[in-house]
Image (cartoon, rainbow, N blue to C red):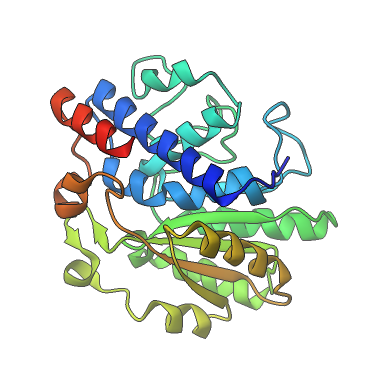
Amino acid sequence: MSNQIGIEELQKTSKKVRIHIVEMLTESGSGHPGGSLSATDLIVGLYFCKLNHDSARPAWEDRDRFILSKGHACPALYATLAESGYFPKEELMSLRKFGSNLQGHPDMKRTKGVDISSGSLGQGLSVGLGMSLSGKLDKKDFRVYVMMGDGEIQEGQIWEAAMAAGHYKADNLCGILDNNGYQIDGSVESVMSPYPLADKWKAFGWHVIEIDGHNMEEILNAYDTAKTIKGKPTMIIAKTIKGKGVSLMEAEPAEWHGATPSKELAKEAIAELR
């Protein structure tokens, strides 16, 4: 179930999740630290305060749904699921290992708490819209949250889903844009600029909320506001920092999209996070 815990406790949980991320990726020697660290506060705030879910019943029919469309950031989701009680924290260290339940992208058939397999970029919003419309047809009151990357929204399927969501007035659908400004080949502005972001989503019939994606109070307020919006979906554009919490990664965001730290660098990062 959703909890109502304080800002300070949520911030402590975000630190724990970030430490898990660094440890997991160092152990695996493969993965994506930058976008996992940038998404952490948004995912933690959702799971520990606003998402209606139950780790003892992962398939509970009336649960809220969360789709990590930018599936390469799954270390942030896995660490949050473990902290939420979906599986033992010790299992986190099996990330990307042969036979592990924690694959390099979310797999709904292997990992408790994962609502949809993802990682083929651009598809999550379409799936989320389908879930939200299904809920309306079944007269359910669950909500659907879809997290996307700002490099990902260069995909055309995102905008087909955005247009359909606006047309069908999917007000139980909430998009979360992890706007850290970078993708695998560099800054999103230099590769294929998605700006101005708010104007685009508004033009497709969405209610738009712009926040600091590391300010927990703003994050929680945005989730609360999204629940009050009727007749249209909501997009939360969260300005974030790639590699948040680890100064080396923050300083070189493009270099840490898909590179993992050495054991020595990991020790420094964990000490900094603590």
Q: How many marks?
A: 0
User: In this image, 34 relative to 227: left or right?
Assistant: left
Res 180 → quadrant: bottom left
State the image coordinates of residue 168 (x, y, percent, origin top left).
68, 73
The image shows residue 266, relative to residue 160, as above or below, that is: above
Res 156 → quadrant: bottom left
Identity of the residue drawn at 73% across and 40% down: 1
State the image coordinates of residue 218 (x, y, percent, origin top left).
52, 65
Q: Nearer the viewer, residue 164 or 170?
A: 170
The image shows residue 217, relative to residue 209, as above or below, that is: above
Direction right: furthest residue = 139
User: In this image, 44 relative to 267: left or right?
Assistant: right
Identity of the residue drawn at 26% across and 38% down: 272
State the image coordinates of residue 253 (x, y, percent, origin top left).
19, 53
Q: Nearer the viewer, residue 163 or 170?
A: 170
The image shows residue 248, relative to residue 60, as above or below, that is: below
The image shows residue 9, relative to residue 241, as above or below, that is: above
Identity of the residue drawn at 23% across and 70% down: 192
Identity of the residue drawn at 41% across and 14% down: 99
